[in-house]
Image (cartoon, rainbow, N blue to C red):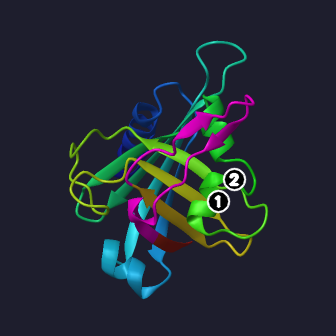
Amino acid sequence: MRTLFFAAAALTLTACAAPGGGPVSTAALVAADAATSLAVGERISEEMATQGPSVEGADPVISLTLRHGDGRRLAFQQANHTNNDLLAQAPGGPLAQIMGLPGEASPVLYHSTSGEGAEGAFFCGPQGPASLGVFEAPDGNLLIVGLRQAIQFETRPDGQVEALPYSPDQVCARLRFRRG
């Protein structure tokens, strides 16, 4: 009976976590190097939720929540809705360059939804990162890079859009994890 109660409670919590009824996945992220361990501890949890689009033909809303063992959390949404966000994530593009990824790697960009200092950030200072670059390597390791500000773009006189140079000072964290 007790097991049934806990199973029902877990299902209820999962339904609440994904307002659109979309899938939710949770994974433990284990620090893969000493620098990451010093910055965030040995382990954090990652929660991914997908909420279907409210308008047909639109992209789904993909949420990423990173939780520290002490309860602090940072929330982000995948940047998949504007042309500049898509340009930033292009293979070998601005985000890949900022993250120091080789060749035609295409990381995923997330923008913060936590609000400034809303949840008590556990990396990138008390306000947390404004954006994250996330890349899962073929060997399964996960690289998360915290950015203090969004990647900016400008339109050249010939009509082409290009990213403005991004200062290395604006990278506030380089974290390496293994899923565990």
Q: Which of 33 and 103 is in front in this view?
A: 103
Q: Is residue 50 visible?
A: yes
Q: Residue 105: where, in percent of width, then height?
A: 74, 61
Per the model, the C-alpha gap separating discs 2 and 1 is: 5 Å
Q: Can residue 180 be seen in this view?
A: no
Q: Residue 171: where, in percent of width, then height?
A: 43, 62
Left or right, 161 with respect to 78, comes to right
Left or right, 116 with respect to 81, comes to left
Q: In this view, does 104 lie above or below 139?
A: above
Q: Residue 176: where, in percent of width, then height?
A: 51, 74
Residue drawn at x 67%, y 20% is: 58
Q: Is residue 96 above or below residue 131?
A: below
Look at the image and give the residue range highlighted in magenta. 148-174
Residue drawn at x 48%, y 68% is: 29
Badge 1 amino acid: Ala
Task: Tell me whether the residue at label 2 lies in contact with that at label 1, contact meaning CB atoms closer than 8 angstroms.
Answer: yes
173 falls in the magenta region: yes
Q: Quadrant of residue 138?
A: bottom right
Give neighbour class at mark 1: few <14, some 14-19, many 20+ (Cα, 10 Å): many
Left or right, 16 with respect to 155, comes to left
Residue that mark 2 sits on? 93
26 falls in the magenta region: no
Residue drawn at x 46%, y 26% is: 19
At mark 2, the secondary structure is loop
Q: In which quarter of the image is residue 14?
A: top left
At mark 1, the secondary structure is helix
Furthest residue in direction bottom, as rendered: 34
Badge 2 amino acid: Gly
Residue that mark 1 sits on? 96
Q: Residue 51: where, in percent of width, then height?
A: 56, 29
Q: Which of 157 and 19 is in front in this view?
A: 157
